[in-house]
Amino acid sequence: MKKISILAFAISSFPVCFAASPPMKSAGHVAVQPFGQTSDGQKVNLYTLRNAAGMEVTITNYGGTVTTVKVPDRNGKYDDVVLGFDSLQGYTQPANTAYFGAIVGRYGNRIAKGTFSLDGKTYHIPLNDGPNALHGGTTGFNKRVWTAKDVSTANEPALELHYLSPDGEQGFPGNLDVTVRYSLDAKNGLRLDYSAKTDKDTVLNLTNHSYFNLAGAGSATVLDHRLMLAASRFTPVNSTLIPTGEIVPVSGTPLDFTHLTVVGSRINSDYPQIKIANGYDHNFVLDSPGDLSKVAARVEEPKSGRVMEVYTTQPGIQFYTGNFLNGKISGIGGAYRYRSALCLETQHFPDSPNQPNFPSTVLHPGEQFKSTTIYRFSTH
Ligand code: BGC
């Protein structure tokens, strides 16, 4: 009698165990399933990349968006650690202004007054963030349908996404041919290789806007995570979050994350830069720009033991603590609440087209833009 009830318990709990870790192990292949249809009738898919270790990432070609990232905790329990939705409607709903998991472009972060000059001509990008243009204007790369191709190698699943942004789209000059290749290595590294070409001088700043909570998407807060940013300087902002043009030391300020520090320990400080952004929403200037072998950022979650390290060839990282999330939108992990996730957006500096002091974001015909970012997961 006892034996039977144990067996019954084991059987009834099987689906739970099954859901806790990704089902099948495979490499060198991308699985495809339908994800929905846009209002103008374009069908989009959901692509699944899984490595031999069992890590699984899903990506939709709507916005080039990462929808889930399932990684183990220190006991081997898998959880989804990015905020996302299980259907296209989640992403297209008007209330979604957060760029969850998306590829951001043509110009990530803000351009002051949506205006810049290039080769003596002035360009205007639609304003969508008070007086400024944010993340490429009202219809950025996050709202475009990309073409997708399985480019897996024998050992690594890989998905190549391509988008041709026409000359004049959202006010930007030049036909811009953009490719983003997502791949998953055997050591739980999610790698993004970006490349782009133009036929006219243009400006470009590409990033991925994933929101991470290493305790699992939908967990209440990210303030208990510990963060290290290999950045001894940052670019302060004005009241509309446009850089002032200065590059200043983080030392002695609540923006000093040069050593692992609890994210929430200084987030409510009176330091003016924290007040302006209502938390962290700043561009950090990396100490070893362009060096993919150096850790640019490290995040640790104490309870699960999950760790994420970021490597990048980009010169900056936007560290954003989800200060504009308010719990009104719900996704796979439940309600996405205030400061319940953090973003580490590898990038060129915001408003560079208007800031002579910052590294250039101009791309010329005949050049190929290239950048790489790796998010690597482990436990401690
Ligand atoms: C910006 C934030 C913005 C968020 C979502 C971040 O990159 O810096 O100010 O609210 O993206 O759009």
Image (cartoon, rainbow, N blue to C red):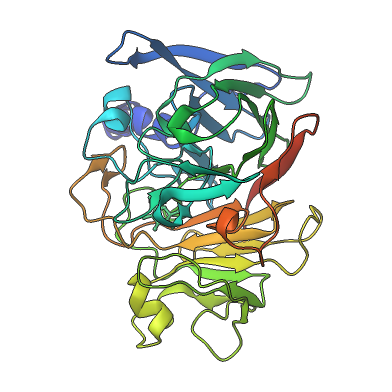
Judge whether 262 appears above or below 374 on screen: below
Front position in the image: 194 or 242: 242
Q: How many numbered tags mark residues here?
A: 0
Farthest residue toward the left?
328
* Left or right of 167 on screen, residue 192: right
- Residue at the spot 36% in from the left edge and 59% down from the top edge: 322
Q: Quadrant of ligand 1?
A: bottom left
Query: Quadrant where the N terminus lies?
Result: top left
Quadrant of the rendered image containing residue 281: bottom left
Front position in the image: 249 or 58: 249
Farthest residue toward the bottom?
252
Front position in the image: 290 or 4: 290
Quadrant of the rendered image containing residue 165: top right
Q: Position of residue 333 (x, y in %)?
A: 31, 43
Q: Position of residue 326 (x, y in %)?
A: 22, 56
Q: Is residue 307 visible?
A: no
- Residue at the spot 61% in from the left edge and 71% down from the top edge: 228
